Image (spheres, rainbow, N blue to C red):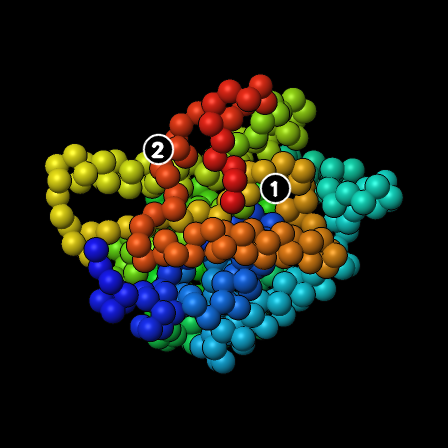
Amino acid sequence: MQNDADNPTSPQHGPKPINLALQGGGSHGALTWGVLDRILEDDRLAIAEISGTSAGAMNAVVLADGHERGGRDAARKALAAFWKAVSDAARFSPVQRSPWDRLFGRYSLDYSPGYLFMEALSRVWSPYELNPLDINPLRDLLEAQVDFGLVNTCQSIAVHVAATNVRNGQARIFSRGAVTADAVMASACLPQLYPAVEIDGEHYWDGGFSGNPALQPLVESPATPDILIVQINPIVRHAVPRSAREIINRVNEISFNGALIKELRAINLMQRLVDAKGLDLGAAGRTYLHLIHVDAEVQDLAASSKMNAEWSYLELLFERGRRWADMWLETNFEQIGVGSTLDLDELFSDPVRPDGAGRSHTEP
């Protein structure tokens, strides 16, 4: 067994390096903000590379920009400033909670007149008809908050952003030198709301369709074998969806988790083959998977709340994210650099059902 003196991830060798894979999910990306804040607070860890999609991509570039400017404390401040700016920009949006939801303390937009009106419009007219000038305040906010020159020259943290090529349906990974505001907006381009983003003659939609998040660049990374996935779209829903909105929501969750599950299955298959043949691939062939996910915590969050950017709501999500990260670190920190804490065989087994049958994988 390797002793601490020979182990590059032991305390005497400095912080343990870790790669992060960040999912998208609209304002639920504030959950990931909370996770990142807790990780940045812990000087036992050093973020090496980040792969992000949609809101995950935004968190990634904001973090990298802040870190390059002034280290982990600056990165924490940059993330807080970004999400506050998102909330401030949404204050005058017509999409607001209904008085009924405010009265009962719900952050859902299911009864918001503005949300329902926009939802109805998006099912009849395309964004090319509704928004021909491609007006997107989020782009202006992102360009004001992030120096993409710094992100692309950042030596401490490498960023990868996934978007989906509309023509061939394949993921494109934008990495160092190609991470631009256009790339991030392409990664977050929901086709019902915004025109496809054109980059180098190709058009792109949300990366969630093809890589949410993309694991390939992190698997190939020489920086560390450890990949921590921050998943904010639940794999499991115990209740069968019955309303039209619930059905659409569940279809989207399954769709946006599909690419991630396929990559995890491929990694699981490779690990099984290596074990079965007794192969020793050395340090370069190791992949240690870790997962902070939210199946249990987001059962109460309506899909429409992904469009709610009220500051009180973002703060609530932030605190949840910090709590998940804190619980995960308390239980799993010692395994970073040693082995996986995500059991893929268990992940792909039958999850627990309401009657108690099956096995659960919803714990932090």
For mark 1, does the 10 Å Cα neighbourhood hold few (<14), some (14 to 19), or many (20 or more) residues? some
Q: Earlier in the sequence, mark 2 or mark 1?
A: 1
In this picture, residue 343 sits left or right of residue 257: left
**Residue occupying the point 54% across, 56% down:** 326
Q: Residue furthest bottom?
A: 70
Q: Secondary structure at mark 1?
A: helix
Q: Secondary structure at mark 2?
A: helix
| Circle 2 residue | 345
What is the count of numbered marks?
Answer: 2
Q: Position of residue 229 (x, y in %)?
A: 43, 50
Q: Nearer the viewer, residue 182 or 76?
A: 76
Q: Nearer the viewer, residue 54 or 314?
A: 314
- Give amino acid for label 2: Asp
In this picture, residue 166 sits left or right of residue 219: right
Q: Quadrant of the N terminus?
A: bottom left
**Residue occupying the point 49% across, 73% down:** 72
Q: Does the rendering let one see residue 103? A: yes
**Residue occupying the point 36% across, 64% down:** 17
Q: CA distance from mark 2 to mark 1?
A: 22 Å
Q: Position of residue 126 (x, y in %)?
A: 59, 41
Q: Which mark is residue 297?
A: 1
**Residue occupying the point 37% across, 39% down:** 343
> Is residue 127 placed above or below 296 in the rendered structure?
below
Q: Nearer the viewer, residue 281 or 337?
A: 337
- Give amino acid for label 1: Glu
For mark 2, does the 10 Å Cα neighbourhood hold few (<14), some (14 to 19), or many (20 or more) residues? few
Q: Position of residue 150 (x, y in %)?
A: 43, 76
Q: Quadrant of residue 51?
A: bottom left
In this picture, residue 216 sits left or right of residue 230: left
